[in-house]
Image: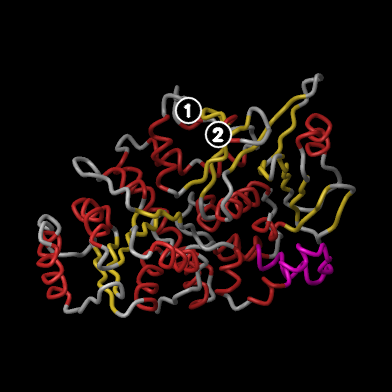
Amino acid sequence: MAEKIFKRKIYERMLRWKKESDGRTALLLKGARRIGKSTVAEEFARQEYESCIIIDFSIADEGVRELFSHISDLNYFFLRLQSLFNVSLYERRSVIVFDEVQLCPSARQAIKHLVKDRRYDYIETGSLLSIKKNVKGIVIPSEETRIAMYPMDYEEFLWAIGKSPACELIKYSYEHLKPLGDAVNREMMRDFRLYMLVGGMPQAVNAYLEANDFSAVDAVKRNILELYVDDFRKIDPSGRASRLFSSIPAELSRNTMRYKVGSVIENATASRLGELLMDMADSMTVNFAHHANDPSVGLPLHADSDCFKMFLTDTGLFVTLVFMDRDYTENEIYRKLLSDKLSTDLGYVYENAIAQMLKSAGNELFYHTFKEDSGRGYEIDFLLSRKDKVCPVEVKSSGYNSHKSLDKFQEKFSARVLRRYLLYTKDIRKDKDILCLPVYMAGLL
């Protein structure tokens, strides 16, 4: 299967780094495995420089690794490097890519001296978790510009499947509050459900385009999930991290106010597993939404580290994880999900998708729960901080008859609210001061 190179938004950020940094920092692309870091780094190196050397430390031989133990004479170092790769480097016109840099700590440490030399540009790729676990005894370079990379967002997915005009229509509708019409919205929702099923992992998208068969897509996603679970077992041989990861769909489907760690691992609490949960966050395979105890501007100041929800970074992987109780996910299940005819409640799948879209758009994730004097509880699915106020967001997996949580939140915190959003499956409209948006517009908030 030929791997396609997809258009990614991070490319523009890399261009800005190249122009603004002008060799004063290295670029570190951090993110989960299999999201396309290596591909975009190599594509950028080949398109934006006269020459490049790509060092993949997952396959680099001892001769390459040994170079980084002796960098006191940089002239000699660069001559040897060019000879090993048979590539000529040109001052300020060439780049060296350190792919999977966490696998060679001495190369990571060398960045400090290489950047100071300023002869060439440097791009590193790696998993933040793996990088943190391989830094013993080395000096961490401060001369790095770090950019977080995520799976393909919905707009990138539409680009990949050849529906770029839909992106422009969605943006215009959102910016001008213009309804799309029922027929167009139904088509847009079908594309969005396709995105939820396939996801944003480039290999899965490629499999869909090549085979047009959900079983091929499912096989790719299962391989990635097994890779993630294996990684968690390496950092936590007890298996607790992998169990917490695998239980995300079950915990979300319970429709509870938090991820109940104790229901997955007996006698465990979030505070006792603090370091392990931090490792999971660093892996960037999951997104945490923390409870904001006080829903006001400066949400991180009021986040409860022991009260959270956990989502998968990619909703396509989430859907496959839901059905990991069997060897493969049947095409019939995918078809019913795509046509919105599967009987199961899909609210938690939509919630995961919205979390993914908000996170990839640069938002940290927070939610809020509160009770009336009568004891009845309400939940705001997501809270966004805008200007000096907050925007509560409620997610519905269908249409709606009411939005009591948004209404009660407005009553309780009216002075703090800038705008209220309801994300659902119908066309864009306003309900008094509530902006009702189709879920595929979440990334524009």
Q: Splitting the image into 4 quarters, where does residue 32 fall? A: bottom left
Query: Residue 39's mark?
Result: none
Is 390 in front, or is 346? 390
Helix, strand or loop at label 1? It is loop
Q: Is residue 47 magenta?
A: no
Would you say 205 lies left or right of 348 here?
left
Chief secondary structure of the magenta portion: helix
Q: Quadrant of the N terminus?
A: bottom left
Residue drawn at the location 44% of the way across and 75% of the way down: 5
Q: Are marks 2 and 1 in contact (CB under 8 Å)?
A: yes
Question: Is 15 displayed left or right of 112 in the figure?
Answer: right
Looking at the image, can residue 1 be seen? no
Q: Position of residue 145 (x, y in %)?
A: 39, 55
Residue 259 badge: 2
In depth, the one of 26 and 353 nearer the eye is 26
Instruction: Decide: is 278 above or below 74.
Output: above
Q: Which residue is mark 1?
A: 270
Q: Quadrant of the C terminus?
A: bottom right
Residue 183 appears in which quarter of the rendering? bottom right
Q: Which residues are magenta?
A: 169-192
Where disc 2 sits, the SS reads loop
What type is the residue that disc 1 sits on? Ala
